[in-house]
């Protein structure tokens, strides 16, 4: 007899894993950063059954991360959780504002109206693609570096 694993079985792990594996997410924070916020400023993490949001102050800005189980929970809970998190920020935490690195391209058409309703606007648009090799004209003008697992530098 062949054993089949249930796909809807609850995931093991804590809050970080739940947010990182959410269906609708922009959650590219490292585990170390998450644990530091959870330890030092737990009021900057809002977690519910439907999803997880957190604000991470860095420099003169704060970065917003979210992970929700679906589009409907995102629509229903994004604003209340965002209001809770912004109220928890101290006056000097984010003088430049709150930024979001939008990484959920497949759900973009559903999420952009929610972000716009909450006064978040598109500032810089990035496109990600995989190329087997660079075209000659591009290769001559660019500098390449090896891909690493090291954390990415935050843009401000």
Image: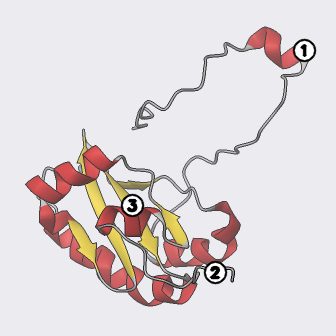
Q: Secondary structure at mark 1?
A: helix
Badge number at residue 4: 2
**Residue 98 lies in quadrant:** bottom left
Badge number at residue 136: 1
Up-down: is 146 above or below 6? above
Where residue 12 appears, as percent x and y from the top left, is 37, 71
Nearest to the eye among marks 2 and 1: give it. 2
Please indicate, yes or no, whether residue 76 appears anywhere in the rendered image.
yes
Marks 2 and 3, how far apart at CA: 34 Å
Given residues 131 and 86, the one toward you in this image is 131
How crowded is the residue under tag 1: few (<14 C-alpha within 10 Å), some, or many (20+)? few
Up-down: is 115 above or below 29? below
- Residue at 53%, 27% (x, y): give it: 148
**Residue 142 lies in quadrant:** top right
Nearest to the eye among marks 2 and 3: give it. 2
Disc 2 or 3, which lies upstream in sequence? Answer: 2
Disc 2 or 1, which lies upstream in sequence? Answer: 2
Marks 2 and 1, how far apart at CA: 49 Å
Given residues 11 and 101, the one toward you in this image is 11
Q: Which quadrant is home to the C terminus?
A: top left
Up-down: is 28 above or below 8? above
- Residue at 57%, 56% (x, y): give it: 103
Residue designated by label 3 = 65
Label 1 with label 3: CB-CB less than 8 Å: no
């Amino acid at each position: 007899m062949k054993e089949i694993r249930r796909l809807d079985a609850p995931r093991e792990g804590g809050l970080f894993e739940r947010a990182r594996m959410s269906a609708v997410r922009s959650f590219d924070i490292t585990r170390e950063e998450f644990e530091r916020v959870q330890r030092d400023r737990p009021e900057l993490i809002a977690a519910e059954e439907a999803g997880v949001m957190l604000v991470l102050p860095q420099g003169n800005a704060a970065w917003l991360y979210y992970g929700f189980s679906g589009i409907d929970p995102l629509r229903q809970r994004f604003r209340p959780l965002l209001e809770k998190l912004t109220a928890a920020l101290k006056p000097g935490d984010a003088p430049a504002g709150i930024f979001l690195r939008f990484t959920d391209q497949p759900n973009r058409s559903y999420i952009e109206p929610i972000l716009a309703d909450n006064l978040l606007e598109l500032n810089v648009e990035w496109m990600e693609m995989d190329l087997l090799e660079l075209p000659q004209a591009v290769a001559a003008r660019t500098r390449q570096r090896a891909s690493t697992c090291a954390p990415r530098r935050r843009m401000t």
